[in-house]
Amino acid sequence: MRRSRSFFLLSLLLIVLCQVGMLLIVRPYYRELFSAAYWRSLVRVGEVMRLVHRNFVTGDAVAYPTLTENALRAIMADLDDYSQYMDKQSFAQFSMESDQHYVGIGVEIQWVDFRVTIGEIFTGSPAGEAGIQSGDQIISVDGENTEASSVNEMSNVLRGQAGTDVTVTVYRPLEDQTYTFTFPRKPIDFPSIRKVEVSDDDWKLGYVRLVQFGRRSAAEFVEALNTLEEQGVRGLVFDLRNNPGGVLPIAVDIAGQFIEDGKMVVSTRGRDQDIVTSAYADNGGNTRDYPIVVLINEYSASASEIVAGALQDYGRAIIVGQTSVGKGTVQSIYQLGDEVGLRMTTAKYYLPSGRTIHQSGVKPDVAVDISEAERLKLFTQRNHLRYLDDVAFEKRFGFQPIQDAQLEAAYSLLRGILAFRRAPAVVSR
């Protein structure tokens, strides 16, 4: 009996060791769990936390959860500018931006004249249905004065549980009146395509502005292109200015609309340079071949740079504007327990030509520089000229609307390309 039991335990031990061995072969990173250096580091961190928790002069700041959060933030922040530990609020914000979905009142807000001001109002939103207008300044929420609140603070206050009511008081500068609205928070799906139009002249020049690369952006972009093509578009301005990037596969899908199927859009290389992951165009054989001008500036980053750079490499677009950010790294997302996570740099992007945009950015084919003051004025115009004429706009914001030199350069280039294409051939005899 004793021999049988010993045999059973030995067999069980061998099975466990085999499973551990297979796990280490399949997932080598688990070997760290058996590393003396790993455990020495954990012990040192734990000892510091214990000493701080026990002896620091202010007891309120040294609870173990607080120390853990602070340590994780410091670890990630020290890696590079893009790696980050995301607490519950940060992780929820990141997920919201990627998924293009949140619960709130359906507006975008911005900082204008030292006040949080309504910019974009989404179609069918509670705010729009209640009568809030672009340009309204939020002065209180649920009776609490919010005039000193930042944009981030106001965003957190306006969001909440679906179905819960929120009361918002706004000041409307042009009327010198305040208005109070009460409405329920609702699930909001917000678009990443903010403007789609085609000129009403013979040139039929299209314009699409994409503000981020969210999970629905590719579908929105295809829908926008189909709408423009139904209207007879002959050339396209694709505006990626101030676009901070987003989801990599979405960037591949969007660039792939103008690149032949099977051609590489981007590749990535991690710590081990021999491991290359490549992504290829796949538009189902519907490669759109009209001329394109892509607008970028010094705030266009990541996925925006991939799209602009890939189209530039294949000669499918003329890039106009200013050199982009130069964020050529891949951030992988690791979700941890309790709805927190890590955003960590794990690879670098490489464009089809083999060049990297990291720290160098995408350089425009046609450079059109504008000052920061001009950029801010154009940002204000874009959000508020939709509901104000030029006189009212100047009265409200203190300056006359200015020309968008980068956009005008893009349109001029497209008109030149189209004029050249339809010019009759000259035959020498």
Image: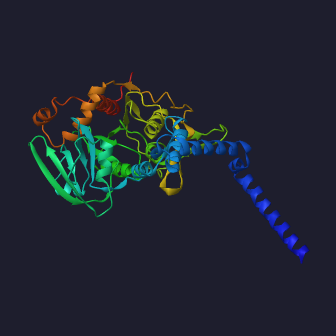
- Res 47 quadrant in image: top right
Q: Which residue lies furthest to the bottom in this view?
A: 1
Quadrant for the N terminus, please: bottom right
**Residue in the foreground of this view, choosing between 326 and 75:** 75
Residue 239, compared with residue 321, is above or below; it is below
Q: Which residue is drawn at 63% across and 38% down?
A: 271
Front one among 375 and 305: 375
The residue sitting at the right extreme is 3
Q: Answer with the quarter of the image where residue 173 lies.
A: top left
**Rendered image coloring scheme:** rainbow
Q: Is residue 280 visible?
A: no
Instruction: Give the residue drawn at x 66%, y 45%.
Output: 43
Which quadrant of the figure contains the C terminus? top left
Percent coordinates x, y for residue 161 in the rendering: 33, 61
- Asked if one can make out residue 121 in the rendered structure from this viewpoint, the answer is yes
- Residue 393 or residue 195, whichever sits in front: 393
Relative horizontal placement of residue 306, taking residue 132 as reference (left or right): right
In the rendered view, does 57 fall on the left or right side of 220?
A: right
Q: Position of residue 352 (x, y in %)?
A: 54, 36
Q: In which quadrant of the rendered view does residue 413 lie?
A: top left
Residue 356 pos. (x, y %) = 54, 32
